[in-house]
Image (tube, rainbow, N blue to C red):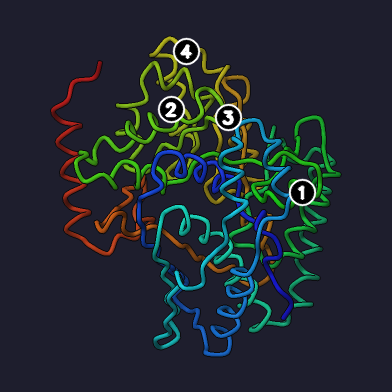
Amino acid sequence: MEQIIKSLLENDLYKFSMGQAIYHQFSDYKTTWSFKCRNKDVKFNEETVEEIKRQIRLYCNLRFKEDELEYLNGIRWIKGSYVDFLRLWKPRYDDFRFELHDGELQIETFGTWLNTSMYEIPTLAIVNEVYFRMNYDYEKLMADFRARADEKCRKVQEGVYKLGSYSEFGLRRRLSAEAQEYIISELSKTNSKDSHFLGTSNVFLARKFNLTPVGTMAHEWIMCVGQGDHKHNPAYSNYYALNAWVKEYGVLNGTALTDTITTDTFLRDFRLTFATLFSGVRHDSGDPIVWGNVMIAHYEQLGIDPKNKTLLFSDSLSFEKANRIYEHFNGRCKVAFGIGTYLSNDTYIEPLNIVMKVTKCNGQDVAKISDVEGKGMCKNQEYVDYLKRSIDWRMKNEGVK
């Protein structure tokens, strides 16, 4: 099989956003990441796993090229000190551990947060592409993918969907590099009065197609900043994480993720200063209409006009779902979408529901308490219970200023 990841730019933009802040503020943090396939009926075999390992070795041999670093340096909020660090950086295969038990693939990475954070997206992209190429008729899958992609583009062009500004977020769960490049190429030529394709989270393809690279922070940022310092009360994870983000970026690069330890808890810390500095917020779990109404009410309660803020939706979206959300909120705020698997892996075969999450930081468990059950991956239920108790105490006993 050809090399899948051919450039270190082939990563989601928020890995560079967080990477710069990690480099400047948390370079000594150590993390453990764990892979999980949530599909109950999917089994991996030895041959597939060996190819995954070979592809990750190839990825670990890559280095940034000078023209790639120049591109990163041209992004407004990327600093020269971080670009200089990336000039020296390379992935380490020794940071990876692989096991296969009764068809269940286990991958863990260990090391500095600077390193292990960068591995998540390329690892998931490799697992996806190897699995589909080795277990199915790939050419048949790709033909079906193209047909569905063409139909989506046709409907956007004809105005069937009203999507406002939307981006492609599908690198981690794409059918293949070929598939992702195809859909981005087609969408970049497809616009209508009510739908504008803004860009992609894949920095490599954003550069190739002269699109906007899109992405700010992920749950790992709130989890590690908020829970990695063992002196912190984890119920204040959002405060610590947002404060560190503002220290790094000021008013630039500011879309806050709300659901790491529930949106209700997030709103306790997302008061006037943060709500003013951040250009918007991102939805990643729970009912999007309910969430959006809550966020608009929150901005209004703070005396901020929500029409000047962006609600970015990114949870399991299709064009149909995005269209409904857009029509509900259009005119009340700025609306944007990050659409993943629906764009990058839509075929007659169910896509893999695979994740790779940070599970430890500085030797201690970390956890996500999402707005819906089933999105966390903490291996220590005692820590999850402790985090829930901390959040519960804060919500019941702390007054809102």
- Residue 298, position in %: x, y? 40, 21
Which is closer to the viewer, label 1 or label 2?
Answer: 1
Q: Residue at x 75, y 35 (%)?
A: 195
**First of labels 1, 3 by sequence position:** 1
Q: Residue at x 68, y 38 (%)?
A: 73
- Residue 377, position in %: x, y? 34, 60
Which is closer to the viewer, label 3 or label 4?
Answer: 4
Q: Is residue 213 left or right of residue 267?
A: right
- Residue 175, position in %: x, y? 67, 67
Q: Which mark is residue 328?
A: 3
Cα distance, mark 4 to mark 1? 41 Å
What residue would you read off at disc 1? 67
Cα distance, mark 2 to mark 3? 35 Å
What residue would you read off at disc 4? 304
Q: Residue at x 42, y 46 (%)?
A: 219
Q: Amino acid at mark 2?
A: Lys
What residue would you read off at disc 2? 247
**First of labels 1, 2 by sequence position:** 1
Q: Is residue 322 left or right of residue 210?
A: left
Cα distance, mark 1 to mark 3? 43 Å
Say whether marks 4 and 2 touch (CB < 8 Å). Answer: no
Say whether marks 2 and 3 touch (CB < 8 Å). Answer: no
Disc 2, SS: helix
Which is closer to the viewer, label 2 or label 3?
Answer: 2
Q: Which mark is residue 102?
A: none
Residue nearest the viewer, comparing 51 with 390? 51
Q: Residue furthest top?
A: 303
Q: Amino acid at mark 3?
A: His
**First of labels 3, 4 by sequence position:** 4
- Residue 339, position in %: x, y? 63, 48
